[in-house]
Amino acid sequence: MTTVTTGITTTDQARRADLETPSSRQLARADARTAHNYHPLPVVVEHAEGAWMTDLEGARYLDLLAGYSALNFGHGHPTLLRAAHEQLDRLTLTSRAFVHDQFADFCGALGDLCGKDLVLPMNTGAEAVETAIKVARKWGYEVKGVAPDAAEIIVMSGNFHGRTTTIVGFSDDPEARDGFGPFTPGFRTVTYGDLAALQAAITPATVAVLLEPIQGESGVVIPPLGYLSGVRELCTRHGVLLAADEIQAGLGRTGRTFACDHEGVVPDLYVLGKALGGGIVPVSAVVADRDVLGVLRPGQHGSTFGGNPLACAVGRTVVEMLSTGEHQARARDLGEVLRERLDAMLGRGVVGVRTRGLWAGVDVDPRVGTGREVCERLMERGVLAKDTHGSTIRLAPPLVIAEDDLLWGLDQLADLVGA
Ligand SMILES: *Cc1c(COP(=O)(O)O)cnc(C)c1O
């Protein structure tokens, strides 16, 4: 077997040169036997609770990534665990060939949370995005009257909607896209945040605008105020569906249930995932009114695992937890703390800060180091975060994080960048 050393950091090597530890053994084994489509920080997590993770040697780390918002309620939330355990013992999978007793409650609760008629459950975020694309196209042909195979969907520069071939085909990130063509036609890219560009791109064949109300992967990029409501207005005026990918931004992260709520915008399709599975199982969904989702008939779309009993039991509990508004309020309150602390680092090792609720993109001064280097040094101090695009660090702590823990984590960052 050849030894692959590409993408291995000095920290990895230092770890591996260490005397054999349970973690170093796991890291070496993982390295040898897995595709290198990720470059994880060299930490091997063994258990976790709330905002804290513990590695094989018993060292504790504050989780400031929360599974890219999949862990909005933290690790092992007792309410979610209870729902999962109860369902595990009773019924886990039927396929959609039969109906199970968790299905109607989940779909009803999620539909109510979104203020929409119908729910189409899937598993991963990318599948939900694919579902929204199919629904928008079908709607375009059957309702809007677009000529066969002519439908166009407008997407945004800097987008991230997942990793399937269709989705990476309309990404403008060379890393996500290069080497995976040929791609699905029917997508047009406009500059995110530019209403005039969007207006100019709309044609009679446009069936949908697909956007993230805040771009997560891009580095928590927040469009100018008035943009989302402007997009809503353009879509309504031109008979175009607005599909909001709230997979990372939605479900409490920004201090509201949905990021679109900040501008009072209601999309035609909500595309949800990540936190919907409570950090336990993959659960995603497209939520829309009957005049849109109603275009799908039996046999035209599906998923073996989509809407399974375990997913529905956990997903319904997530929706119940969000319906009190408690987690959204916490994201707002802690978000103030986050913003204040990060703003204080501006000009002192940090050159840019964007926050909305308990979510931040932090541009570190390149003289301090790359985002990856900063995350490695944070790890050494017991804080786990993730870099994105060069020198940006994304912070998305679990919404249940204790304020003191958040402050401690931010102190580590401040200290490290020299603020
Ligand atoms: C993570 C993410 C996806 C893809 O979700 P997966 O579950 O990884 O397929 C899609 N859109 C956005 C905005 C995301 O953050």
Image (spheres, grey):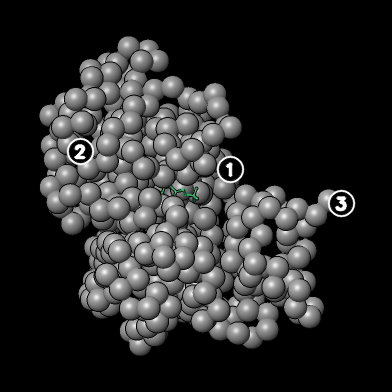
- Would you place residue 120 above or below residue 206 in this image? below
Q: Residue at x 80, y 54 (%)?
A: 3
User: Label 3 sits on what residue type?
Assistant: Met
Q: Residue type at mark 1?
A: Thr
Q: Horizontally, is 22 left or right of 63 in the view?
A: right
In the depicted view, which residue is nearer to us: 172 or 256? 172
Q: Which mark is residue 221?
A: none
Whole-percent x, y for residue 12 in the image = 67, 67
Residue at 44% x, 22% y: name it.
185
**CA–CA distance in space, label 1 to label 2:** 39 Å
Q: Which residue is mark 3?
A: 1
Between the C-alphas of marks 2 and 3, the distance is 51 Å
Residue at image mark 2: 194
Whichever of labels 1 and 2 marks the residue nearer the N terminus, that label is 2
Q: Residue at x 63, y 70 (%)?
A: 11
Q: Which residue extends farthest top?
A: 147
Q: How packed is label 1: few (under 14 Cα within 10 Å), some, or many (20 or more)?
A: few
Which residue occupies the foreground of this view, 307 or 76?
Answer: 76
Picture coordinates of residue 349, whole percent (x, y): 35, 71
Under circle 2, the secondary element is loop
**Residue placed most toward the observer, 293 or 105:** 293
Circle nearer the N terminus (3, 1) = 3
Secondary element type, mark 3? loop
Q: Can residue 302 be seen? A: no
Residue drawn at the location 27% of the way across and 70% of the way down: 347
Give above or below for 176 relative to 204: below
Residue at image mark 1: 304
Task: Work out how far the residue at label 3 is from the one at label 1, CA to CA, in angstroms.
Answer: 37 Å
**Helix, strand or loop at mark 1:** loop
Q: Residue 337: in sight, yes or no?
A: yes
Q: Amino acid at mark 2?
A: Asp
Residue lying at the far right in this picture: please name it.
Answer: 1
